Amino acid sequence: MTVTHDDLERALRETFSRRVAVPPPLAADPAGLAIGRARRVRHRRALTGLSLAVVVTAAVTAGMAQLNGHPGRPTTPTVVLGDPRGAATAAAWPVAPAPEAPPAEGQVELIVGGTLVTPDGDRYDLGIGPVERAQRLPDHGGWLVVGAPTPAGRTLWVVPSGQAPQVLLAGAEEVALSPDGRQVAWSDGDGLFAAGLIANRLLATIGTTAAHGATPVRFVGDRLVVRTHGGGHLLWRPAAGTLPDGNPTVLDVYGVLPDGRPVGRVPAAGDPHRSCLAVLDPVDFTPTSTDCGATLADDGRGAVSADGRWLLVNGRADGTDGALLVGLAAPGLGGVVRSAGPTISGAVAWSGAAVAAYVDRSGALARVRPDRASIGERASMMTLGGVTSDEPPVVVADAS
């Protein structure tokens, strides 16, 4: 039996339309993204040793279509499911009510084993599989959740308070969320896009299809920090369309000060094997001040507190790798540097400037209090139940 690509596309679209129950149209069609990716890949790589008959059999018997792998990803066939939640019954899921005011100092929300755990210990099974990042929506509206990367890409979910999770975006390579939860950016191949989040929908999508492999990192106001394909970073205003030239000397960007200046990592002058902390010009990304006192890791993990006084970042102190607390003394740098806890393995969630929470490599929850860490006290640790090596816990960031 001869099966055309059009037949496969129609079958895939029908699968998405039956199993993703989101009445209004998505800003980014999951089926369209998956099909578009398959089309691009077919032009770049020839699939050998896999029969179309086998693909059709798998599609009929398992309710899925197997598409070519994306360059740079595992070469096993990509599996695109009609609904990333699988066959779970959505009506049976417990759904989280409207979140209360931001958790009290030192308390955090977590996602552990696909379950949202509130500071009070209430548990709500999200039913969406492994999670990479999560963030509260503003005005007690619920949560944004970025699924862990799969061969088919990343999925962005919105979990409205009192409702079941809904897919906003599927098949993206990288996803960035603005701190206030009102903007989303994503990359797909050579495309880089941004959209506003209004009434739990992605609207007014703009971007460029000539990003040449650039990926979104974080929002700085209405601009986006972008990591270029060849290394370095740039600041992009999505409304401008094309990307400006990047600054290859900016290695990582950790966050932004209250006055809008980004804080990042740059090579040390005259020693490419060392790096320094830097405050960057918000226009051209050139360093305006640097401090080479802290030995910073090259994994880019870290975050600046909301008031701009502190940076919690991976690095090395006293011969030991772990999380460092760095004081960001006004108007530039030069503050205290202290070993604060074990190595950060994911996102850092700040509660103002009072407490920073993160998960270490063992899956334990660490809390750092800058007022105590600055005088030598290390992070308090809590072992979490239900943790598996293939699905580490995720700290939920508050909307700021």
Image: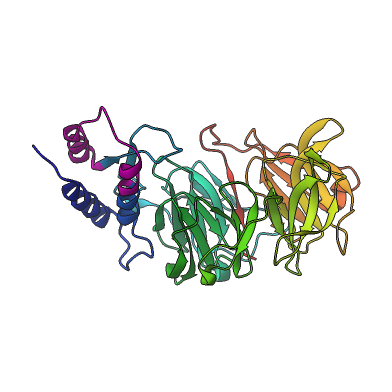
In the picture, the quarter occupied by the C terminus is bottom right
In the picture, the quarter occupied by the N terminus is top left
**Left or right side of 113 for 85:** left
Look at 89% across and 50% down and name the residue there.
336
- Looking at this rendering, what residue extends furthest in the left direction? 1
Toward the viewer: 25 or 69? 69
For the image, the number of numbered tags is 0
Give how far across and how far down residue 116 sits, in percent.
52, 50
Look at 75% across and 68% down and name the residue there.
258
For residue 247, what is the image quadrant?
bottom right
Give how far across and how far down residue 48 sits, in percent.
27, 30
Give how far across and how far down residue 387 sits, in percent.
56, 35
Toward the viewer: 169 or 373? 169
Task: Please say whether residue 353 is visible from this viewpoint.
Answer: no
| Main SS, magenta residues | helix
| Magenta part of the chain | 38-64
**Left or right side of 97 for 257:** right
Q: Is residue 153 magenta?
A: no
**Left or right side of 317 for 63:** left
How did the renderer colour the structure?
rainbow
Look at 73% across and 57% down and name the residue there.
105
Task: Please say whether residue 310 is visible from this viewpoint.
Answer: yes
For residue 331, what is the image quadrant?
bottom right
Q: Is residue 61 magenta?
A: yes
Toward the viewer: 399 or 46? 46
